[in-house]
Image (cartoon, rainbow, N blue to C red):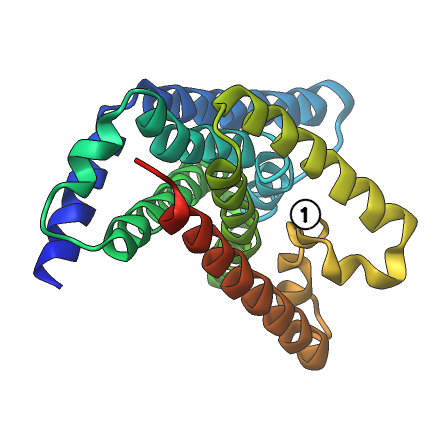
Amino acid sequence: MAGFKAAFVNETVKLLKKKKIIAAAVLSILAVLVGQAAVTGIKYGFGLRVAGSSEFPLVVLSLFTYTILPLFATFVTIDMFNGEFSSNTMKLTLTRPISRFGVYSAKVLNAALFIAANLLFVMILSLLAGLLFNPSSASLTGIFRVVLSYAATFLPVFVFTLLVVLLSNLIRGGLAVFFLSVLLFAGLNFMGIIFSKYSSFFITSMFNWYTLWISESANGFKIFRQLLILTGCGIMLFTAGYYWFDRKDI
């Protein structure tokens, strides 16, 4: 564990130094501001109440999870693996007294940390914006629904990131991994629409599964079934990614 902790801290420091973190934060702020400006403009321009203080973060989440979050999670993951392999810094990392599994786990955990931190950042921003511009509709129940929705969104996005981890260890070029990830993202969404009965087996179609958690009549069996599917896919992708990471010739 001492070696793993050192590797995790090292990966966290490298992650914080990446310019993509700043870009993701700036775009997240802009997304919240643009969304709030649109909601306010519709409210005062047409007299329509589009979203209250508790509904606005959910509107932001529905757009954020299909655009900025998976895009930058893909960028960060590619940098962690393909970027280090292409710059030969992976050799220095693996010469330290830690197993390859420890290095791999530290990188995957940092990818999870990035996703969780990004979701938390956007949730706080959107809640503050909603409370500032429409405080009369605020309620503890609504805030709890928002927190639950953002927490539930973490798992499907993380499982998709594990798919990118697998591709990053299968393919040497980072640009090829990025374009293949985009194609898979679009393809999985398309397959989820065409084969709606089997949409639970397509990872990206579950980016909005938080709606099951906050619905008035929550379907506990369906939530549990999708949780098992996501967990199973995550375990398989994590294992396959490590298999190819361990086989790489440094």
State whether residue 145 appears in this view.
Answer: no
Is 213 above or below relative to 133? below
- Depth check: give the residue in front, 58 or 113: 113
Q: Position of residue 91 (x, y in %)?
A: 21, 33
Residue 202: image quadrant is bottom right
Instruction: Looking at the picture, tell me which residue is in the foreground, 241 or 121.
Output: 241
Residue drawn 15% across the image and 53% down it? 98
Decide if residue 140 is on the left or right side of residue 102. right
Residue drawn at the location 56% of the way across and 29% of the way down: 177
Give the percent coordinates (x, y) of residue 130.
50, 38
Between 45 and 219, the one nearer to me in the picture: 219
Q: Residue at x 49, y 51 (%)?
A: 158
Query: Farthest residue toward the right?
Result: 194
Report whether 175 appears left or right of 3: right
Residue 201 rendering spot, x and y as whole percentages: 73, 60
Instruction: Tell me the residue at 48%/20% (across/down).
Output: 30
**Quadrant (top left, top right, bottom left, bottom right) of the C terminus:** top left
Quadrant of the rendered image containing residue 49: top right
Q: What residue did someone put label 1 on? A: 204
Instruction: Give the quadrant of residue 5.
Output: bottom left
Packing grade of label 1 (10 A; few <14, some 14-19, many >=20) is many
- Total marks in image: 1
Residue positioned most to the bottom: 221
Tag 1: amino acid = Thr
